[in-house]
Image (tube, helix red, strand yellow):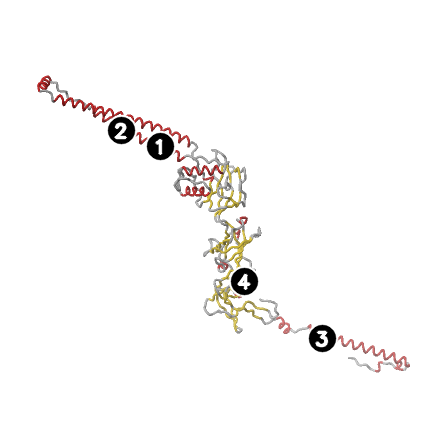
Amino acid sequence: MAEFEESDVTPEAADDGVGGGERGIRRRRRVLVAVMAAAVALAGGGVAASTMIKSPAQAAAESEPPAPDVLTAAVEKRVLTDSVVVRGQVSAGQSVDVAPAGGGGAAGAKPVVTRLPAKAGDQVRAGQSVLEVAGRPVFPLRGDLPVYRDLKPGATGQDVKQLQQALKELGFDSGGDAEGTFGAGTKEAVKAFYAARGYDPLPAAPDGDAQVTAAQDAVTGGERALADARDALRLARKRHDDAVAADRQQSRQQAQQSAAPATGAATGAATGGAAPAPVGESPVDAARTAVDTARKQVTRATEDLAKLRKKVTDAKASTGPMVPAAELLFLSGFPARVDSVAGRIGGEVSGKVLTVSAGALVVKGGLTITDKGLVRPGQVVEILSEVTGVKAAGTVGAVADTPEDGQPAAAAPGAGAGGGQNPAPVQGGAASGYAMVVQPDAPLDPRLAGQDVRLTVQAASSAGPVLVVPLSAVSATADGRTVVTVYENGQRRRVEVTPGTVGGGSAEVRPLTGGTLKPGDRVIVGVKDATGAGAR
């Protein structure tokens, strides 16, 4: 600081009386204040400069990261629980495409859709027509065996038995026909069924009545031929009897002549009166031959008549009402549902016209290998349709032991599990990985048929207590091993493990070497900056 000197005050100022002295004192004070302010300013600037200027060593030291803080979590042994969320497809036990081939009653009629009484989503009852092609109906009936042929009078087989049972359920009994035989009783049942639906059944043969009439006429001719043969036999037998009687009479006469007096005999001998021996066949033998011939004619006429009568029976059996394959649809259960309608009235049938499904609605989904470990039959499932908002409850009915062909089964730890994690999607609602079937607790809303829905398996859990660590504790080494790192007394120890089920942000681990990992061990889940900025 500069020093204040008395010489700075001139003698003139000192001699300037009282007023001049006061002015000098004030002047000196102002100078002193200014000098002190400048000194303070210079000192503050030096301090500021000293804080901004750092040595290279100091700068390098401050740029180093702070000491890390290891984050650990305890190994637990518990039941691993979670909610597994997957996609599923609602479907029925049976789905059938209705594509009538050769439909139409009249010969040469075009297979044009003439009536579509049901639309997509409608329920269908047994015996209710779902389609009409060229004026001919298509009837769904109960049965497991698919239609593969026309069912005509005289046919036999399991499909005929199935038809008889289906008609009986609707109140049309096949009478005394044997099971599996399309006889007269089944024909009457078919006639009554079609009539109750407002249709006439198609005849098995267009000229069937004419065939029966011709066969019956032939039987009449055969009956007449048999009657004529029998008359001829009776006549031949009468002639035979007459011939036998005449022969006997002649024999008596000859015997009487043999007993006459000797003279007479001698006379006769002398005169040559003995009768000459007959030449050729006797009248009795001829009559017997005629009887045999007539008997053969009767036998042949009887056989011919039997054949003609069988033809009548066959003609009657093979004619009458039939059930064409194009007019029949066997379904496993009712009520059935119309899933989709591809045809239109007036359109020609060139493929499927509609799709009908039957049986109870179930939901089929797919599980990854990690989800499979959490899901077991009997667990509760929530079924949700995001399209309609419909919710339903169900249970896991079955889980496949092996993945479906061509479908992924493996997933990274955590994929597909619930607890806020993204589920592995099932593309298009089709099951992937391990197939899972969900049985609804109550019949599902028919509107859900064919829909893609969300399945939440509630309270899914591992089969029992397992070693559990946070997912972030599981890592992979460069050589492909899966490990967790145990942190103990400031030392790190890697333990190779096999990952298991995943849920709720945790994973099951099974150490490859026993005793190397136990409940209570601390495993590293991350490293945190000393500043608390977050895990690295």
Q: Secondary structure at mark 4?
A: loop
- As drawn, 459 above or below 486: above
Q: Are marks 4 and 1 in contact (CB under 8 Å)?
A: no
User: How far apart are the two marked residues, 3 and 1, measured between alpha carbons?
Assistant: 137 Å
User: How far apart are the two marked residues, 3 and 4, measured between alpha carbons?
Assistant: 58 Å
Task: Read off the residue under disc 2.
Answer: 295
On the image, the x and y values in percent for residue 436 come to 49, 55
Rendered-image quadrant of the N terminus? bottom right
Task: Read off the residue under disc 3.
Answer: 47
Say which of marks 3 and 1 sits in front: 1
- As drawn, 522 above or below 151: below
Q: Left or right of 422: which side holds 265?
A: left
Give the mark, 2 or 1, whose residue is nearer the N terminus. 2
On the image, the x and y values in percent for residue 286 come to 22, 25
Q: Amino acid at mark 4?
A: Gly
Q: Amino acid at mark 3?
A: Val
Give the mark, 4 or 2, whose residue is nearer the N terminus. 2
User: How far apart are the two marked residues, 2 and 1, measured between alpha carbons?
Assistant: 21 Å
Task: Read off the residue under disc 1.
Answer: 309
Say which of marks 4 and 1 sits in front: 1
Image quadrant assignment for residue 158 = top left
Q: Secondary structure at mark 1?
A: helix
Image quadrant assignment for residue 504 = bottom right
Q: Find residue 329 and name its label.
A: none
From this viewpoint, is residue 458 visible?
Answer: yes
Q: Nearer the viewer, residue 59 or 109?
A: 109
On the image, the x and y values in percent for residue 132 come to 51, 38
On the image, the x and y values in percent for residue 272 come to 11, 18
Image quadrant assignment for residue 207 = top left
Q: Amino acid at mark 1?
A: Arg
Q: Are marks 2 and 1 in contact (CB under 8 Å)?
A: no
